[in-house]
Amino acid sequence: MKNKFFIIYIFIALLFTACESKSDCYQNYYENITNYEINSNISTKLGIRVDSSDYKVDLQELDNRITKIENCIKQVALEVENTPQNEKKKWQCLHDVDPNTGLKYKCIVIKIIAPHYSKCSDWQFIGVKAPDQYCLDKGITPTVDCPCMWRTAIQDNNHIITPPALYLWEIGRIMTSCNNIWYSPFAKCLIF
């Protein structure tokens, strides 16, 4: 009888530990526009998991780029602390960024998928059409031959879907919770 209670206790403890670690991750409530199965097969030194889909990935370069984005976001967070709320509202952030809090590496998974190409651009895409307004906002006019397409996506709050070019802008959206990050001061952090 004592062993049964011990096993039940261990099961409940593991259950709460699993729930706790998931709740420690980002909850940004971005719409899932992809539904890829993710099986991370490698990890960076920072602990970011990667599903390489058999594409070659330079893990150190990945860590370096993510660290640059993270450090830039923390610096910008200091710079925008006194920005009026009505201005911050345009960035569509769920919360202010704490400049003392780093990226939660253990939460991030990067899924590399086969690239899709457009005859109108040299960019790699993920093969999912984006709303035309998003391209129009960037000064690009979509057409039937050249539709507005997503280059990356966030799936399940913490999974970044990217072609092999490894566009890492979504790190910024995850860390800041800003859906409209391209129109915020954090945009300068997305060029690495």
Image (cartoon, rainbow, N blue to C red):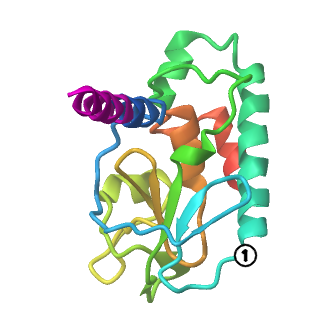
Question: Horizontal placement of 159 versus 145: left or right?
Answer: right
Question: Horizontal placement of 19 versus 71: left or right?
Answer: left
Look at 34% across and 76% down and name the residue there: 127
| Badge 1 density bin: few <14, some 14–19, many ≥20, Cα 10 Å | few
Residue to which mark 1 is pinned: 58
Classify 97 as above or below 174. above
Residue found farthest to the bottom? 119
Question: Horizontal placement of 6 versus 68: left or right?
Answer: left
Name which quarter of the figure residue 179 lies in: top left
Foreground pick, 43 / 119: 43
Q: Main secondary structure of the magenta part?
A: helix
Q: Quadrant of the N terminus?
A: top left
Residue 189, given in percent of the width and then of the height, sits at 71, 46
Residue found farthest to the front? 1
Magenta stretch: includes residue 66:
no
Look at 74% across and 31% down and name the residue there: 74
Residue 58, given in percent of the width and then of the height, sits at 72, 75
Q: Quadrant of the C terminus?
A: bottom right
Magenta region: 1-15
Residue 192 seen in render: no
Classify 58 as above or below 17. below
Q: Three-letter amino acid code at disc 1? A: Asp
Foreground pick, 57 / 44: 44
Magenta stretch: includes residue 8:
yes
- The kind of secondary structure element at disc 1 is loop
Question: Horizontal placement of 181 versus 23: left or right?
Answer: right
